[in-house]
Amino acid sequence: MLTITICVGSSCYLRGSDELASALEGFIEKEALQEELALAGSFCMGECSTGISIKVGERQYREIRPGDAEPFFYGEILPRVREREAGCRRTG
Ligand code: FES
């Protein structure tokens, strides 16, 4: 299970972190990845000036906007899921 953690602190919230979370949740459902991806909220990640803060696993991203949800999901998150699946098949 890979966890996507989205900052819901006041600065990120004002930039649309809830909208971003909803969009990502929609892509998770669309791709039927509920068993592989979890969404979580976080208090301030200490990067308020750089746009919405988000972590995928332990990797932190900054300057993500709600309008970036689709390219971010398909360009960053989905490849990470596929990598993990491939790793499990190799080791399992
Ligand atoms: S409010 Fe999100 S990083 Fe500070």
Image (cartoon, grey):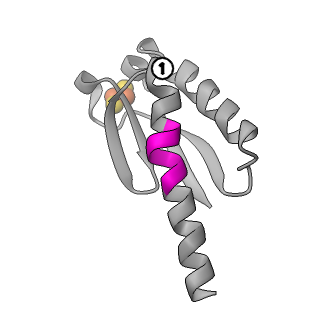
Asked whether residue 42 is in view, the answer is: no
Please give the name of the residue rendered at 53% of the width and 76% of the height, measured from the top-left corner: 87
**Magenta-span inclusion, residue 76:** yes
What type of secondary structure mainly makes up the magenta span? helix
Please give the name of the residue rendered at 32% of the width and 23% of the height, measured from the top-left corner: 51
| The quadrant where residue 27 appears | top right
* Ligand 1 lies in quarter: top left
**Would you say 14 lies left or right of 45 here?**
right
Image x and y of residue 73, in percent: 52, 38
Please give the name of the residue rendered at 52% of the width and 40% of the height, measured from the top-left corner: 74
Residue toward you, 87 or 56: 87
**Magenta-span inclusion, residue 37:** no
In the image, residue 76 sits, relative to residue 30, either above or below, namely below
| The quadrant where residue 15 appears | top left
In the image, residue 7 sits, relative to residue 77, either above or below, namely above
Image x and y of residue 76, in percent: 44, 45
Q: Which quarter shows the C terminus?
A: bottom right
In the image, farthest residue toward the left: 49
In the image, residue 1 sits, relative to residue 7, either above or below, namely below
| The quadrant where residue 75 appears | top left
Residue toward you, 30 or 4: 30
In the image, farthest residue toward the top: 14
Magenta stretch? 73-79
Asked whether residue 45 is in view, the answer is: yes
**Would you say 39 lies left or right of 42 here?**
right
Image x and y of residue 48, in percent: 28, 26
| Label 1 sits on residue | 66
Q: Residues within 10 Å of mark 1 (few under 14, many from 20)?
A: some
Circle 1: element type: helix
Please give the name of the residue rendered at 47% of the width and 18% of the height, measured from the top-left corner: 67
Ligand 1 lies under 8 Å from the Cβ of mark 1: no
In the image, farthest residue toward the bottom: 91
